[in-house]
Amino acid sequence: DLYPSLSVVGNAGYGNFNGFKTPDVNTTWSGGAQLAWELDFWGKFRRANEAARAELLATEFAHRQIQIDLISQVAISYFKLLDYKLRLQISEATLASRDSSEKIISARFEQGIVPELDLNQAQIQTAIAQASVPKFKRWYHQTENALSVLLGRQPELIQLMNSITEQQFPDSIPLGIPSTLLTRRPDIMQQEQKIYAQNAMVGVAVAQRFPSISLTGMLGSASNNLAIFNSTGAAWNVGAGLLGPIFQFGKNKRRVEIEKIKTEQEVLIYEKTVLQAFREVEDALISSSTWKEEFKANERQVKAAVNARFLAELRYDKGVTSYLEVIEYQRTAFDAELSLSSSRRDFLISFVDLYKALGGGW
């Protein structure tokens, strides 16, 4: 709209009126090129062009935000897949161990060495481990299918190159991360461009309150006889037009006010986006530090629980304690191993959340 438009025009007519009434009925033929150009005195088209460029940039930043979201979701799903695989392996190993223990307890019960209560307790623990196997198997395959879709594939088997215990934690997060990093977040840049676009629309609304001036021109040929159409000489016309509002009951004024209010709305949305960005960064930093503490505590818990389970089983075999003590420490060790895997996963995911919150890392 900033530039002239060139069109091809052609007309054929029959009658006694061709701009004015004639005494005879005539046939008219005309054709040529027509040029039209609305002069942008008040910046209406320039501001509209400015708004369109800002909207284009906003869509580019929205596209970048989708990329970051997709990268984050792939990483999170992958860590979940590794976690469920490890927890499935822990459950299967625990089931095998408890199944062997149940057989031993069953043989002892048949010999009258242990009471039936010990056998029932062993059966309960075996069933608990047995129920956890299909649960983690279900979670594993559902996460595998979700990750396949994120990768743009049909649900399929995903080859895992390593386990979650082999995942390396990123280097420590540097202290005093500058808040200027947030200015590169795509959602903030997208909203910033929306403000620019909407502000430009205010200029468009203001320009619509003033007259529009247009230049027109036509160059071609016209004739009353098609046979001599090309030999009649050139027909041309040049003109200018002015169209402006005089009184429209405040419609143009209200249009400007509406666009200004929309701009204020976009500014408020921008402020909300920035505040939300600060919150997400703070949440991610807190999550990273606290998950690290929880992970380290779970490591110590697993080490102590596994050793306590070994000692309890040894004491039971020697006849020093009851089977209830063995069951308690077996349950504690099993739960601790599962918690360690999930806390390792959440610790890794906290770095993904921080990567996303900072618009692509630090």
Image (cartoon, rainbow, N blue to C red):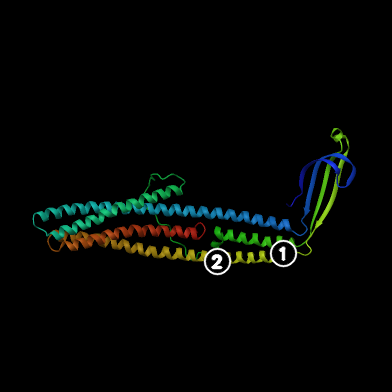
Q: In the rendering, at what x and y percent does residue 7 appear?
A: 76, 44
Residue 177 vs residue 116, the one in the foreground: 116
- Residue 85 drawn at (x, y percent): 34, 51
Q: Is residue 95 visible?
A: yes
Tell me the residue that label 1 is attached to: 251
Q: Is residue 147 above or below residue 292?
A: above
User: Mark 1 Cα within 10 Å, few/some/many (few <14, many 20+)?
Assistant: few
Rendering coords of residue 237 (x, y %): 85, 46
Please tell me in which quadrant of the rendered image residue 203 appears.
bottom right
Q: Quadrant of residue 102?
A: bottom left
In front here: 235 or 5?
A: 235
Tell me the distance, in whole angstroms, between the alpha carbons under discs 1 and 2: 32 Å
Q: Which mark is residue 272?
A: 2
Camera-nearest residue between 215 and 224: 224
- Is residue 237 found left or right of 45 in the rendered image? right
> Does residue 163 appear in the picture of this structure?
no
Three-letter residue code for mark 1: Lys
Residue appearing at x 66%, y 65% in the figure? 258
Question: What secondary structure is marked by label 2?
Answer: helix
Q: Is residue 143 above or below residue 280?
A: above
> Amino acid under label 2?
Lys
The local secondary structure at tag 1 comes to helix
The spot of residue 217 in percent (x, y) is: 82, 47
